[in-house]
Image (cartoon, rainbow, N blue to C red):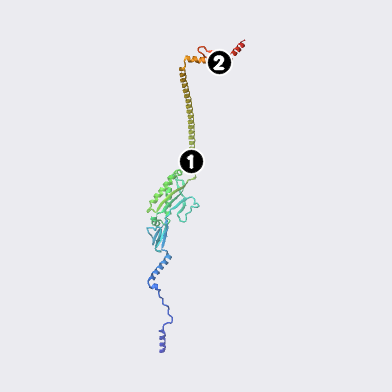
Amino acid sequence: MPADLNDWMNKNNNKKPSFEPPKFEPPKFIKGGSGLALIIIGIIIVFGILFRPWIIVNEGEIGILATTGKFSKEPLYPGMHFYVPVIQKVIIVDTKVHMISYKRIQEAGTMPDRYGTIKVYPAINVLDARGLPITVELSVSYRINPDEAAYTIKTYGLNWEDKIINPIVRDVVRNVIGKYPAEDLPVKRNEIAMQIETQIRDTLNKIDHKPVIFESFQLRDIVLPENIRKQIERVQIAKQESERAKYEVLRAEQEAQKQAAIAQGKANAAKIEAQGKADAKLIEASAEAKANIIISKSLTNNLLKLKEIEVQGKFNEALKANPNAKIFLTPGGAVPNIWMNIDDKKKALSNGK
């Protein structure tokens, strides 16, 4: 190769290219050192938006923190709590009062609510002391123990109600109802309800860690077999008739006692009235007797003679004024004076002819 050609090639190879890429220079605020902090903050914001490493626990709820699948014993109470996504998660558990209602028919308005705090199960079928089928309707109210929520979910799972409450309620109802004959159930309803509530409460309290807090119990209905129900109705009707007959007898006795009391009262009143009249007459007679005694003591012969003369004078005056007077018998001393009507004497004489 000629020397001049080699020189030309070497000269061209040593030339710089006419286009050079632009050099990147970081902004001044990054060169100052504060840029790194802003980058970290931006990364945290993006991470927070994507993974949301916090959770809010509401009232009536409890949070269970699970780290790589292991539950924390301490629950997360209402408020805001932070956790590490992917590695940790929070399970929300409802701590409000729940209810299981055992019914024969699922009526409108008794469907489970949207929060799952009300559940409707079929009525409980049991056997009485003689083996007769009985259907029982009842309701049970309860809530999870917040302090033992982690243990409860870890041991029984999220369907802990079906594993704890439902079996206990059914077993207790069967044990209690099975002690009584069917015809005694309506009469001893309150006694049976108290036994069921007490046994449910005691059984729940015996479970390790006491996962459930028992609130209340209601025995709604005891459905008896048709033949037993009719027999009870007949017995009740007979008892009512017997009670009514006793009432009628008692009423008749009371009426008789009332009439006897009225008659006795009237007799006593008449007796009292007669006694009063007799006493009044006796008093009057006694007073008259006393008056006569006083009068008789005051009469003397001279006074009587004087009164006789006065009366005789009045008769004489009367005869003068009325010569045709009727007969007058006037006692006067030893011999009474007799005054006769003269016309009557003439008539008598003329009639004698």
Label of residue 317 in the image? 2
Q: Is residue 127 left or right of residue 346?
A: left
Q: How far apart are labels 1 and 2 at the CA level?
A: 102 Å
Kindly give the residue lying farthest to the top in the view shown.
353
Q: Position of residue 153 (x, y in %)?
A: 40, 57
Q: Position of residue 221 (x, y in %)?
A: 47, 47
Quadrant the N terminus occupies: bottom left
- Nearest to the observer: residue 200 or residue 266: 266
Q: Amino acid type of disc 2?
A: Glu
- Nearest to the observer: residue 29 or residue 314: 314
Q: Position of residue 152 (x, y in %)?
A: 39, 56
Q: Amino acid type of disc 1?
A: Gln
Label 1 Cα neighbours within 10 Å, binned few <14 / some 14-19 / many ≥20? few
Please tell me which residue is depicted at 49% across the width and 44% down the height of the picture. 229
Viewer-nearest of labels 1 and 2?
2
Label of residue 15 in the image? none
Residue identified by numbered label 1: 236
Q: Is residue 329 above or below residue 6?
A: above
Is tag 1's residue or tag 2's residue first in the polypeptide sequence?
1
